[in-house]
Image (cartoon, rainbow, N blue to C red):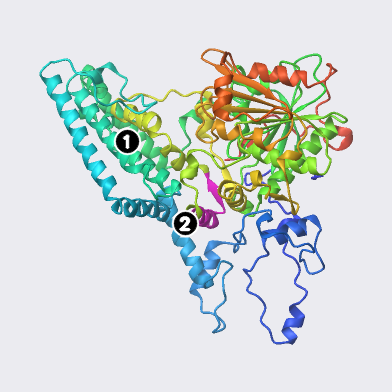
Amino acid sequence: MARQSTSKPSARGPAIRTAEHAQPQDKTAPQRAEKGQQNPPAIAFPSDATEMAIASGNTNSDGASETEMPPDCTPCAPRPIGVPPTPLAQFQRFLAPQPTSKAQPSPTGGLVGQDTADRALHAAQARLTGGISPISIASAAFNWTLQLANAPGRQLGLAHQALENGLRLSNYSYRRLMQMPAAAPFAPRSGDRRFNDPAWQALPFDIIAQSHFALEDWWRSATTNIRGLRPHHSDQVSFLAQQMLDFVAPCNFPWSNPRILRAAMSSGGRSLALGARNLVEDISRRINREPSPALAAFKVGEQVATSKGDVVFRNDLIELIQYAPTTKKVHPEPILIIPAWIMKFYILDLSPENSLVNFLVSRGHTVFMVSWKNPSTDDRNLSLDDYRRLGVMAALDTVSRIVPEQRIHATGYCLGGTILAIAAAAMARSGDKRLASLNLLAAQTDFADAGAMMRFIDDSQLAFLEDLMWDQGYLDTRQMAGALDTLDTSNGRAARMAERYWMGTQEHWTDLRAWVEDRTRMPYRMHAEYLSSLFLENRLSAGRFAVEGRPVALGDIDAPIFAVGTEKDQLAPWYSVYKINLLAHTDITFLLTNRGHNTGIVAAEDAGRHYRINTKSPDDSYIDAQSWLSANAPQAGSWWKPWQEWLADHSGDMVLPPKQGATEKGLPPLDPAPGHYVLMP
């Protein structure tokens, strides 16, 4: 049971001191000194498996694990995570003369100073590239070039296609210029809305657009289905080619975009002046690190995160909020929500009319919410298992004390759902029956098809990103936002930039857009372990993800599962979320709703919403994702309603609501919601 802190956190937040972070005492140093042996270098840290063994008490007197685990079942990433106190101290050590002539090895091989200098260089490069590894990109481009150079038949085919596309475009241009009927030979790719304006059908803009579509068509053929090219490299190359084409698309420039020209002429050039002003303001705000205007329009605790409640528990990683009831009676089983730490929790408690918390409370549910601390450099050694223990398990323990003898509807969103699934599997292994249900909202448990981010994740990219986090102690999501923005250029960022900087339009801020601007950070060690063990190695679905030294299996979970996927999710594709049907052997209700990762989950209104839903029992045969999609017709409305009805069906008869906190058990209300951690910059 994690001890509760009753004092308010400082701006930096209290530093965590847990058993995992303590170095085992070296009792052999005197014997080595007597034999004239040198002590090991100070930066040689214990492995992740040893640290986990120390935390669980499964060690001998020297801090070594009594039970040797298979090499592929280590609880964390295989890379050594131990780091020096600060990069500056390490660099100074590199510059200083060594006391002995014998060079000391670094944990990753090579000399200490060389390793430090390399990592410092990579960290500096990462700041310039938005965290994207140039080596990873160059490797993919080089592989594609070699494979294509060794395929003369494919080269002839591409040359023939280039000639054919040119002839089709020339014929179309001639007929249009001669005012003869002509069918467009090329079409924009699916979902591309940049050229929907009717002005693109008029001369000469239709020919300009068709030229761009012809170029896209050729490059699509040149970068896909290359025999011998690794699928990962093929995805990277085709994606990069599309990025370059999107950059030079005619809709991005005023002289080739009819909408920009029309706005400039109708306003007498005022739209261009307003666009220039927007550009200067945005650059100035970025240089001065000023907050987004959206954060002033939607203040936490005033316009968003306004649901009434109390912080009833606080440790070094989370605050736990218990929301006040708004009905005379409630369902006896409380709901515990674990949001992702990559985001602030109030995406589920936006403005009152757009709040999932408010929706559940108004229908007679007792709701608890985890609010994650925004980590700083001092939290660099927080591990993924710390997020399970100090986050999920500490929250579960607290809810069980406030609402005793009641099982809990545990709900996880995005990464919060992944860590909740890991915790649920570990609980099932140990016979812990506290879960009434497991609810996974856009949360993946199998990362083989983990969306567009998989284009960036390989060993080279992970090492590059680790060096950036090693240097700062965390990953700032402003840095990660650069990579995420590149996933949505044609219909998102590029289009908004063209309108803002060329047409002078102002941003339309919403509560959800304001939440997106309220960035967070992720600790170095935790995020490195997450990317390595889950994204890169996919250990959880393979039964190789260890908790407390032993692998966990999602098949052990016997609580009913409600999983939600969203149709246009690029971060957690619905067909990846759907794989819970393969991994768990319990009653599973899968719901697929429209829209994306965030806009699909935040679904208060019914207008423009639909969902598909079906339940699979353990005795039913598995149905693949596409067959499931075809077999289940869409139903109009928000998915919140069928989920709430499902929760009610899996709950008992209504009772009087519990008190706020449990003062007699040392859990008094500490502060009013939304608490302090959510306000940390």
Residue at the location (15% across, 20% down)? 176
Residue at the location (24% across, 37% down)? 161
Question: Against 681, is 81 above or below?
Answer: below
Question: x%, y% of residue 307?
Answer: 67, 23
320 or 5: nearer the viewer = 320
Question: x%, y% of residue 171?
Answer: 15, 26
Residue 655 appears anywhere in the view:
yes
Mark 2 or mark 1, which is nearer the start of the sequence?
A: 2
Residue positioned most to the front: 153
Judge from the rendering whether residue 425 lies leftward or rightward of residue 508; answer left or right. Answer: right
Q: Which residue is mark 1?
A: 246
Identify the secondary structure beneath mark 1. Answer: helix
Judge from the rendering whether residue 1 lies leftward or rightward of residue 242; answer left or right. Answer: right
553 or 155: nearer the viewer = 155
Total numbered labels placed on residues in the image: 2
Magenta stretch, main secondary structure, is: helix
Q: Which residue is mark 2?
A: 123
Quadrant containing the C terminus in the rendered view: top right
Question: Against 605, is 233 above or below?
Answer: below
Identify the secondary structure beneath mark 2. Answer: helix
Question: x%, y% of residue 489?
Answer: 38, 34
Question: Against 628, is 633 above or below?
Answer: above
Q: Nearer the viewer, mark 1 or mark 2?
A: 1
Residue type of the residue flagged with mark 2: Ala
Residue type of the residue flagged with mark 1: Asp
Residue 677 appears anywhere in the view:
no
116 or 548: nearer the viewer = 548
- The residue segment tinted magenta is 462-476
227 or 44: nearer the viewer = 227
